[in-house]
Image (cartoon, rainbow, N blue to C red):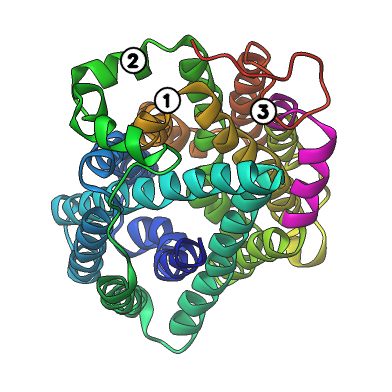
């Protein structure tokens, strides 16, 4: 688990050194229209989240090590390509490669983290959300440092290309470290050794059609995917609407790195105590619904918040509320997945959770990009409706384990 946590930390340093500045680079640097910028960002999210199911299935079949190593190699190539891409076609190709790289290594790391969290819960009685919150906090610590690295390179005159190359170098180090340190997974974790040998040789252990049918015929799991989609569509606005708001308020993108740093600093300092409180006091479903409602409040607050110091108070309010909602709902959603599917399908289900969300982001990205041209109150009100819809869907889910609500035991299907 220490290796998985360190992995998440390093991944996000390299990733967030580049991504916060991509929208401004596409719009101001390459002259793309708002709808096209939204489409490119949606394609990146789809090639990552939408293809998580591929990475999850490969993880179930081959174990996490080869999938993580392949993802790191592709991310290095993608960042190097993006650094020198100058046309719409080459930018889209580089962005798709970057996204697919994450579609390989993220499900591998996340499904292993979920297995370890369940194992820790069974061994100690401590809620699995605690372990998953530590995993999330480590990722956000990397997300805190990544934008600062990107901002520093921009301030030093290195530009977007320098940020891309710096991100590639981080993944070179990650690849080298994992090639040496990441162990082979010899059996299905969370399953007794005798059963694991049988599981490894039966058709249901393989990522074929029976496993896909079992996962996608699971009504409760699909409802979780749809509710989580509302969050991911909202979260994607950090890379689309937030840069526009920062540019409008200050006339520059310089403050963007600090807004991302604010989000990450909140997670690093608040995630563990907040998850400790929510895991003991409320059911995962309640945490998921509350988190989505807080995210919606973040969108609604932007046109209602008076401009503060240097005009950034509305953007900062949005970032704080979005981050608080994220801290509540992400560990809860991930903690629900092992309750809804079989252990041998956990990699596939972890990938499917993000894949369904990625498809939703792709479908909505051009539309949300077009919203950049409408008045701010209308734009933020429409965006607030997205996570609210997810919260409504989440009411139909099982309560999940770890809460105080009656009937907290989740039932698959």
- Is 302 left, or right, of 74 in this rendering? right
| Mark 1 and mark 2: Cα distance apart in space | 9 Å
In-image side of 286 versus 35 (left or right): right
Query: Decide: marks 1, 2 in contact (CB < 8 A)?
Result: yes
Q: Residues within 10 Å of mark 2 (few under 14, many from 20)?
A: some
* 3 or 1: mark nearer the eye: 1
From what the image shows, is residue 337 above or below residue 77?
A: above
Q: Which residue is mark 1?
A: 342
Q: Nearer the viewer, mark 2 or mark 3?
A: 2
Q: In the rendered image of this protein, does residue 302 appear above or below residue 368?
A: below
Instruction: Say left or right for 330 vs 88.
Output: right
Label 2, label 3: how many angstroms apart (C-alpha)?
37 Å
Check the image and name the residue furthest to the bottom: 156
Residue 28 position within the rendered picture, expressed as x and y whole percent measured from the top left: 38, 61
Judging from the image, what secondary structure is the residue with disc 3 in? helix
The front one of 272 and 98 is 272
Marked residue nearer the N-terminal end (3 or 1): 1
The residue that label 2 is drawn on is 214
**Left or right: 54 with respect to 246?**
left
Q: Which mark is residue 381?
A: 3
Of the image marks 1 and 2, the number of the one nearer the N terminus: 2
Distance, label 3 to label 1, CA atoms, is 39 Å
Relative to 123, residue 144 above or below? below
Residue 90 on the magenta span: no
Mark 3 crowd level (few <14, some 14–19, many ≥20, 10 Å Cα): some
The answer to whether residue 251 shows anywhere in this view is: no
> Please, what secondary structure does the residue beneath circle 1 have?
loop
Pick the front one: 374 or 148: 148
Q: Main secondary structure of the magenta part?
A: helix
Q: Write down the region rendered in magenta.
A: 272-289
Q: Which mark is residue 36?
A: none
Residue ID at (56%, 41%): 118
């Amino acid at each position: 688990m220490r290796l998985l946590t360190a992995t998440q930390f390093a991944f996000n340093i390299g990733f967030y050194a580049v991504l916060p500045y991509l929208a401004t680079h596409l719009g101001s640097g390459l002259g793309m229209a708002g709808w096209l910028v939204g489409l490119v960002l949606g394609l990146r999210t789809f090639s990552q989240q939408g293809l998580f199911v591929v990475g999850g299935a490969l993880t179930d079949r081959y174990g996490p090590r080869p999938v993580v190593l392949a993802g790191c190699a592709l991310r290095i190539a993608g960042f190097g390509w993006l650094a020198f891409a100058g046309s719409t076609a080459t930018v889209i190709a580089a962005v798709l490669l970057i996204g697919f790289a994450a579609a390989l290594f993220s499900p591998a790391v996340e499904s292993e983290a979920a297995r370890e969290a369940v194992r820790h819960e069974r061994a100690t009685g401590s809620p699995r959300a605690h372990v998953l919150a530590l995993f999330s906090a480590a990722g956000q610590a990397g997300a805190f440092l990544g934008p600062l690295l990107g901002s520093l390179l921009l301030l030093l005159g290195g530009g977007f290309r320098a940020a891309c190359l710096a991100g590639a170098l981080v993944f070179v180090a990650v690849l080298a470290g994992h090639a040496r340190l990441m162990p082979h997974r010899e059996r299905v974790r969370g399953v007794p050794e005798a059963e694991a040998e049988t599981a490894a040789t039966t058709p249901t252990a393989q990522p074929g059609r029976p496993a896909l049918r079992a996962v996608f015929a699971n009504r409760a799991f699909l409802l979780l995917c749809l509710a989580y989609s509302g969050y991911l569509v909202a979260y994607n606005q950090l890379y689309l609407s937030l840069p526009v708001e920062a540019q409008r308020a200050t006339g520059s993108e310089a403050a963007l790195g600090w807004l991302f740093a604010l989000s990450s600093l909140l997670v690093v300092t608040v995630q563990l105590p907040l998850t400790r409180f929510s895991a003991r006091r409320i059911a995962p479903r309640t945490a998921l619904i509350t988190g989505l409602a807080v995210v919606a409040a973040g969108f609604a607050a932007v046109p209602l918040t008076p401009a503060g110091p240097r005009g950034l108070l509305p953007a900062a309010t949005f970032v704080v509320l979005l981050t608080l909602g994220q801290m509540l709902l992400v560990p809860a959603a991930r903690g629900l997945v092992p309750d809804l599917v079989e252990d041998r399908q956990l990699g596939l289900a972890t990938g499917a959770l993000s894949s369904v969300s990625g498809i939703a982001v792709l479908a909505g990205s051009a539309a949300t990009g077009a919203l950049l041209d409408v008045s701010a109150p209308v734009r933020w009100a429409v965006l607030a409706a997205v996570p609210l819809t997810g919260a409504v869907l989440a009411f139909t889910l099982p309560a999940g384990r770890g809460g105080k609500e009656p009937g907290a035991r989740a039932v698959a299907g």
